[in-house]
Image (spheres, rainbow, N blue to C red):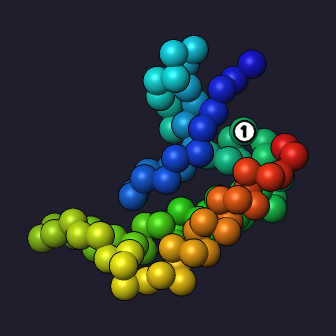
Amino acid sequence: MRKICLHLECGSYPIQELDSNGYIIDDMSAEELGFSDDFCEKIKIMQKLYNDLFINNEKEFLYIGMKKPDDVSRIKELYEEVAQLNI
């Protein structure tokens, strides 16, 4: 059985496969794992919102989430919804 985790990280796939010790083996897409369209859409929205909490360009990498409390709240809501899905 595969062990996966949901871990938001700027510019990365949010789903990782873990080995038996909990170390990341590989990033995975929700579609690759055969999850429902609803699950995949929520993951995409969550990752987009999370990426938008940062300025990331050739000059700077800066967290600006404190200026976007509604986005932070929405990410938390989506995370809870995804955690409750029976997949």
Which residue is the site of mark 1?
A: 33
Closer to the camera, 51 or 81?
Answer: 81
Left or right of residue 77: residue 17: left
The location of residue 67, given as percent across then percent down, is 37, 85
Q: Residue at x 54, y 83 (%)?
A: 70
Count of numbered badges drawn on the protein:
1
* Residue 39 seen by the camera: yes
Q: Residue at x 79, y 46 (%)?
A: 35
* Residue 28 seen by the camera: no
Left or right of residue 28: residue 58: left
Amino acid under disc 1: Leu
Left or right of residue 71: residue 31: right
| Quadrant of the snapshot with the C terminus | top right
The location of residue 3, given as percent across then percent down, is 66, 26
Q: Residue furthest top?
A: 20
Q: Residue at x 36, y 79 (%)?
A: 66
Left or right of residue 37: residue 55: left
Closer to the camera, 21 or 27?
Answer: 21
Closer to the camera, 61 or 28?
Answer: 61
Q: Relative to 8, does residue 72 appear above or below in the rendering?
A: below
Q: Relative to 46, does residue 64 appear above or below in the rendering?
A: below
The location of residue 21, given as percent across then percent down, is 51, 16
Per the image, label 1 sits on a secondary structure element best described as: loop
Q: Residue furthest left?
A: 59
Q: Residue at x 75, y 19 (%)?
A: 1
Q: Relative to 16, does residue 85 appear above or below in the rendering?
A: below
